[in-house]
Image: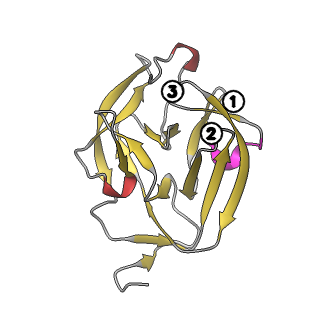
Amino acid sequence: MKEEEKILNAVGPNFSFTGETRVLLGNKKLRRLDRIKPETFVLSIDANSLELIPVKVTDSDALKEIKVHPSFDKWTFSDNSFLKTVGKVKVFSIEKQGFDFLENCEIGEHILKADGSEVRLIEHKCYKRCVHYFSLELSTNNFIANGFIVGLNEAQNFDYKNLNFLK
């Protein structure tokens, strides 16, 4: 491990993903999470208008001290997509009609993606190896990561049946 890398929290941070997670930018291009800086625009759902809108990132780990955690979780879904997370992360659960922590989701539960598709959670594995992790902060408290609508702690639930999905 490099000198500047530290294992900051053995319990695990919240709302963090591994660096290779792809985030949908305001211009509909994808960028790795570890390369997103403050002032970058990412797509987010406005809970009032139910529109996907570009929102400015107010804080990002990309320019800060490298954070390392001794493990990560890999969540795999029925369309072969996946999320690699560190700590608790919220996704939009169809069964619960709102955001919930992935760790509370059951195998077989349906998760909403930004294109309107609903995929089943089919596998959860924890890997005990060090990984860099990153998070974003933005006013709407949600963004699109690997095609999923993910929420931060204060993410507002919305009526997903009336959402104008990404096409």
Looking at the rendering, the stretch of residues picked out in magenta corresponds to 100-107
Q: Amino acid at mark 3?
A: Asp
Q: Position of 126 compared to 91: left or right?
A: right
Q: Is residue 27 left or right of residue 67?
A: left
In the displayed structure, does residue 64 sit left or right of residue 124?
Answer: left
Tag 2 secondary structure: strand
Crowd class of label 2 (few under 14; some 14 to 19; many from 20; radius 10 Å): many
| Closer to the camera in the image, 80 or 152 | 80
Q: Secondary structure at mark 3?
A: loop
Marks 3 and 1, the one that precedes in the sequence: 1
Q: Are marks 3 and 2 in contact (CB under 8 Å)?
A: no
**Would you say residue 101 sits in the magenta stretch?**
yes
State the image coordinates of residue 2 (x, y, percent, origin top left).
Answer: 38, 84
Which residue position is annotated with label 3?
115
Q: Are marks 1 and 2 in contact (CB under 8 Å)?
A: yes
- Quarter in which the N terminus is drawn: bottom left
Disc 3 packing (10 Å; few <14; some 14–19; many ≥20)? some
Residue nearest the viewer, comparing 166 with 85: 166
Mark 1 burial class by Cα count in 10 Å: few <14, some 14-19, many 20+: few
Residue 95 included in the magenta stretch of the image:
no
Look at the picture and state if 107 lies above or below 47: below
Q: Is residue 152 left or right of residue 65?
A: right
Pick out the residue farthest to the left: 39
Q: Nearer the viewer, residue 114 or 67?
A: 114
The quarter of the rendered structure image containing the C terminus is top left
Three-letter code, disc 2: Asp
Indicate whether 7 appears above or below 83. below
The dot on residue 96 is: 1
Q: Which mark is residue 100?
A: 2
